[in-house]
Image (tube, grey):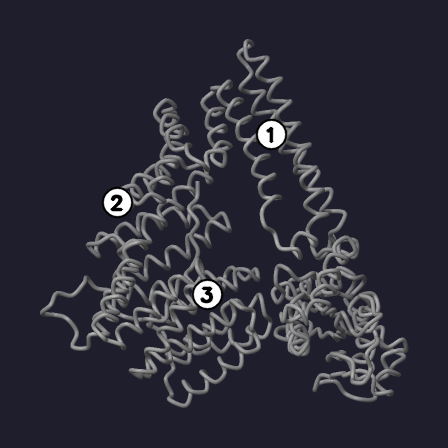
Amino acid sequence: MALSLTPCHAVAWLLAWALLALPCRAQAPADELAAWEAQVQALKDYGTRAQLLDFLETGVKRHEAAGQARMAAAALLELGKQLRDEDGPRAEQLLERGAALLGQAPDPALQFRYRLLRLGQLKARHQFEQAVAEGNELLATARARRDWRDELKVLLALEEGWEQFHAFSRYIEDAMRLAVAHPGDRLTWWARSEWADRLRSEGRRAEAERLLLEVLQEQVTAGDGIEQIRSLVNLGMFYRSGREWDKLLPLGPRAIRIADQLGRTPTLLPHFLCNQSDALLLAGMPAPALEMADAALVAARGAPGPTHVARFNRGKALNRLGRHGEGLAILEAEAQGPERWEMLNELAEEYAFAHRHEQAYATLQEHLQGLLKSQEEAHRAGLSLDQALAEADRERSQRQASERRTQQVITAAVIAAALACAGTAWLLVRAARRHGRELAALNAQLRETAVTDALTGLHNRRHLLSRIEAHVAAADRAHRDQARTGMPPVDLLFFLIDLDHFKRINDSHGHPAGDAVLAEAATRFKGLVRREDELIRWGGEEFLLMTRDTPRDHAAALAERLRQALLQRSFQLPDRQELAVSCSVGFAPYPLGSGGSWEASVELADQALYQAKARGRNGWCGVLRLKPPATEAPSCGLEQAIAQNLVVALYSPTAKSGGNRSDQNS
């Protein structure tokens, strides 16, 4: 059983105070605010979240009552930051109260912090363009002061969530360059660790591991135990994702040694040890998994979340070591409460492992009943209209398939229970469950194969056609209701991407080389898009990208990033030759005036791609919107629409005029 553990958001790392024991009165810093912030940081690292929130709430009341506007503002800003994810409206109120107090007692550092936190507010409201504008102003302020730390804080705050809004991604490289230029600092350690996670997501695991280990070594040299443990957490998640169990195994004991040297138990430690225990169980190493679970119990000091997970993992490890009675008793005690059904599948597996077939069957049946009930409740939950309409068909088919698979598994398990008297029923229960899983996996694989391109791993046209109507309906409703809701409308942007001179690659280097180029190009494009985007192998050397909620004014920036993705480094062919590859991009939005269709937008994107090819390739061309007074989608071709001044069209600076149209398909 794993405990959810992810790297902290950038905003949570903005304070870089030294991590020491709480100072006594005689050692307190001269500045009251600095002393208070040191206490806050110590609570973050060694206290519970409840203790931190109580300290902040009490501080707000005490400082406001004493008329200490500066201290009260600091407490309000920190409390608003802590509550941002769980209670957005209250967090916003707290930040604004803090800003009002700073109007009474100006403090440049706290005012800068408020403006930094405001960027997170704007992003939470999806006011991305305003976030970029205010962030750039703040960035200019930091650069004018030549304060690299404040500059990096702004860059990190801006790049956070770049997957949701492509305009933020340009700040990532700037943040990384600044972090590399200033090693040995907590803020830059965090920035480089985040960069390593992005490298991992792009498949560049060797670079990511090297960067994480470099950061860890700097922390060892600096003697910063807390940050060493944070790096071990990142390495643990990294090695688990690659199933590198031999590298993962020593991380837990190393973290325990660091905590012993600190003389205190960091809050992060029990969570990390729980995840280490879970990973080692997954790796089939119950003995070290038991050691990590026991160590997590000690480190948790009774904290409910990690204590429960540590006990559960301890029970599993004991059962796997043959101590069935002891292990199962722990598991049965922990699998209680309102979330019981979620743990029952693991409990059933442990019963089966211990040859307790009747209990395995009963537990499995209870789990499946709970699963069905949960699905029904989820479908009754308050999904937004857009979500419900966009996902109704997909969820209906998934639910039906899940119900069929569930019935198959229950039926097989009932048969197994009926044969229990033969003494082999526990084997049949496991076989039935395995058979049900295999059927489910096979059905899922067949469905996915039908909509997946085998060469690139991307979805194909069939996948897009099965989902496009929901996206179009959401965009139509958003534009139709804009006047009533005042919300920015949802746009769809279609990008057609074509590899330049691809035929020459096949002719000169062979089709295996062409396949390798296509697969690598797909990988690079995938590194730029969000989960909710649709990246499609459209046919041949052509890809289609559909984005939702990307403002039209940022379409050109995304097209340029797609172009640059192929130019950033050469492609390596199967024979080890290196080859430079470029692409041309055409884009168009939906809706584009009244009477248009998404197919018409794709056709416009295709014609824009033709324009980019005709202008010399290695560039992009796109349509943003209609030019007033035009209100209807142009029925003529793009070239004629541009000539008649009906649309706003953009061209990349790299595109040259006077290209050879006859060769545009190459």
Give the x, y percent position of residue 201. 55, 60
Q: Is residue 410 left or right of residue 337?
A: right
Label 1 belongs to which residue? 434
Asked whether residue 353 is in view, the answer is yes
Camera-nearest residue between 127 and 29: 127
Categorize mark 3 by other alpha carbons within 10 Å: few (<14), some (14-19), many (20+).
many
Q: Determine the CA span between mark 3 and mark 1.
A: 38 Å
Instruction: Name the N-terminal-most of marks 2 and 1.
Output: 2
Q: Specify the quadrant that holds the C terminus.
A: bottom right
Give the x, y percent position of residue 496. 76, 69
Categorize mark 2 by other alpha carbons within 10 Å: few (<14), some (14-19), many (20+).
few
Camera-nearest residue between 465 and 396: 396
Give the x, y percent position of residue 623. 76, 78
Q: Residue at the spot x=83%, y=65% of the render?
A: 599
Q: Would you identify the image quadrant in which residue 400 lies?
A: top right
Give the x, y percent position of residue 40. 27, 64
Label 3 belongs to which residue? 194
Label 2 belongs to which residue? 301
| Amino acid type of the residue that numbered disc 1 sits on in the rendered structure | Arg
Asked whether residue 496 is in view, the answer is no
Q: Is residue 179 left or right of residue 578?
A: left
Categorize mark 1 by other alpha carbons within 10 Å: few (<14), some (14-19), many (20+).
few
| Amino acid type of the residue that numbered disc 3 sits on in the rendered structure | Glu
Instruction: Name the N-terminal-most of marks 3 and 2.
Output: 3
